[in-house]
Amino acid sequence: MKEIVESYFQQRSLVNHQLASYNDCIPSTDGKLSRMEKIVRNIRIGTDEPIEDDDGGIIKLDVLDHEIVIRMKNIHLGRPTIREANGAEHPGTPLECRLRKLTYYSPVHLDFQIIRDDKPTPDVEERVHIGNLPIMVRSAQCNLHANHISHLCGDADRKLSPQTSTEDADRLTELLRRAGEDPLDPGGYFIINGTERVLISMEDLAPNRVTVEKNKKYAHETEVAKIFSQKDGVRKPLNIEKRRDGMLMVKIPSAGTTPIPVVLLMRSLGMENDKEIFTAIAGPAEAMKYTVANLNDVKDNEEYNVETSEEALQWLEKKFAAGQQKEYREARIQNLLDKELLPHLGSIPENREKKAIFLGRIVRQVLEMAITDMDPNDKDHYANKRVRLAGDLVEDLFRVSLQQLARDLKYQLERHHNRKRELRINACLRPDVLTQKIMHALATGNWVGGRSGVSQLLDRTTYLAALSHMRRVTSPLVRSQPHFEARDLHPTQWGRLCPNETPEGQNCGLVKNAAQMIDVSEEVNEHDVKELLGEAGVDSSPSGWASGFRVHVNGDIFGLHKNASKLVNQFKRRRRQGRIRSEVSIRFDGANRDIFINTDR
């Protein structure tokens, strides 16, 4: 056993999960789109243009005489540098930043282009400095990384390969000592104003996954299905509840507190006839009477009186945009159905049929639970959880900071244009908008989304205390409530979380630590998996959704397949051959005719 553990840690450090997550987030040199580049390309300020792959981010200015659009892409992250008061720059080391109370960061640059009346200006403004990003010590961008430390120590003739031979390992140790660093320090933390800060991993419920539970709010129980639909950092919850009278109601939080009957919502998504709604819900024979009762209630009840898709849309307009102009009412409901309702299934009108099918599937789970008296889903099961590491937290912060920078740039450019000045991105962009937002979050621990205590002062009491602090996992639940189930040691935490190391008192069981030999998976590109599924005969645009087994990829319905067991066996065989990464999971639900594939991080 000792040999296995030793060989494992020759390849990776004890905080490998934090480093790998951060490296996956920042721009890399291997040509694949990094998470930061995707954030840049997804930016849309002042326009609702759909996101194309090679478009880049778009800022549209509100000016009268011209149509001016700014495009931005190609994010570039430099080496960590220290800038002196006289403007001189030199490579920064963690040691110098600690001693001089500086921040260990790298400059971030972007390429911009101004397009006036659909004519691109000939000169693209390349490498505009947009701000600084703190660098994690020992990450791929850090000056102490094996690829860069030779340059730092003025010994650039011999390239170091990370940890392959004992000779290279000894040389790396020697170079680290020359740079004033402890060779045994694993890195995985940031240096902000001279203090070492570590990002604590957060436990979160898995997005795009339906969980069914019993709601004991009043004297009686009702069955509720919940899903957090998440795409590109936008998170929209959705609840479907079966009331005591058998009515199935949907609550979309962003549309106010008014519940909408499920059948009416499925009608508004384009399901004209009753047969389509029946096949979408299906389920056990006893579920039929509930479906019929819901259909009849929406038809005959004075409050709804809806029979066609047109009437359903009019009812929604009356409910959510009463007294407004017709154009506004229509736009409000289109936005509700496309952007607010289950965004992970897509945000264009063509995805509405898929959304109606998905709603039917959620309803079936609620009805099955009500009829067969099944147990609710276990929220503490580790399959229903995701751990958000340093890379995910930095990604959230960068997304919000860049949006703020883009809005500020739009305002500054409009001012310049109104004063008849020449538009230069360099003159209008204020890099400290991005830098200050990121620094403030890392220095105080107050993160975007209202969470606090995300960034903490690294505990350097002992070497083990520091290691333990960088492998900590915390739960977002309120500390003052009992939450007995959440604090219990769950069997699925075996081999993933340490059963002993947890604080006493109110944090007991909510603050946990990773087990020794864990590795947290990074995202596998779902396009690769979808291509393989296409080869295996999955029909991604079928005519009817009831005539086969539905294949879900990360919660999104990808297509239909006629022979499920053959597909699952083929998929597992490819995974064993190494054509599909081992972290990709597949689950076959025969009773509901569903196949679930997850490739998320």
Image (cartoon, helix red, strand yellow):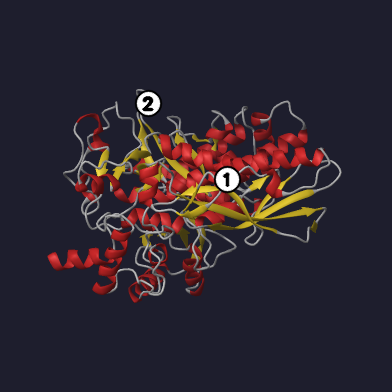
Q: Residue at the location (77% across, 54% down)?
A: 115
Q: Is residue 381 left or right of residue 529?
A: left
**Which quarter of the rendering shows the N terminus?**
bottom left
Q: Residue at x 45, y 43 (%)?
A: 227
Can residue 308 be seen in the rendering of this structure? no
Q: Position of residue 533 (x, y in %)?
A: 48, 69
Q: Residues within 10 Å of mark 2 (few under 14, many from 20)?
A: few
Disc 1 designates what residue? 402
User: SS class of the residue under badge 2?
Assistant: loop
Residue 519, x across and y down, in percent: 30, 58
Which amino acid does the dot numbered 1 rest on?
Leu
Q: Which residue is mark 2?
A: 217
Q: Are marks 1 and 2 in contact (CB under 8 Å)?
A: no
Which image quarter is the C terminus in?
bottom left
| Residue 265 x, y percent position in the rendering | 58, 40
Answer above or below: position of 6 versus 311.
below
Which of the numbered marks, if any, corresponds to residue 386? none
Which of disc 2 and disc 1 is earlier in sequence?
Answer: 2
Say how many tags the image has: 2
| Residue 19, quarter of the rendered image | bottom left
Residue at (48, 58) in percent of width and height = 79
The residue that appears at 69% across and 54% down in the rendered structure is 71
State left or right for residue 401 relative to residue 490. Answer: right
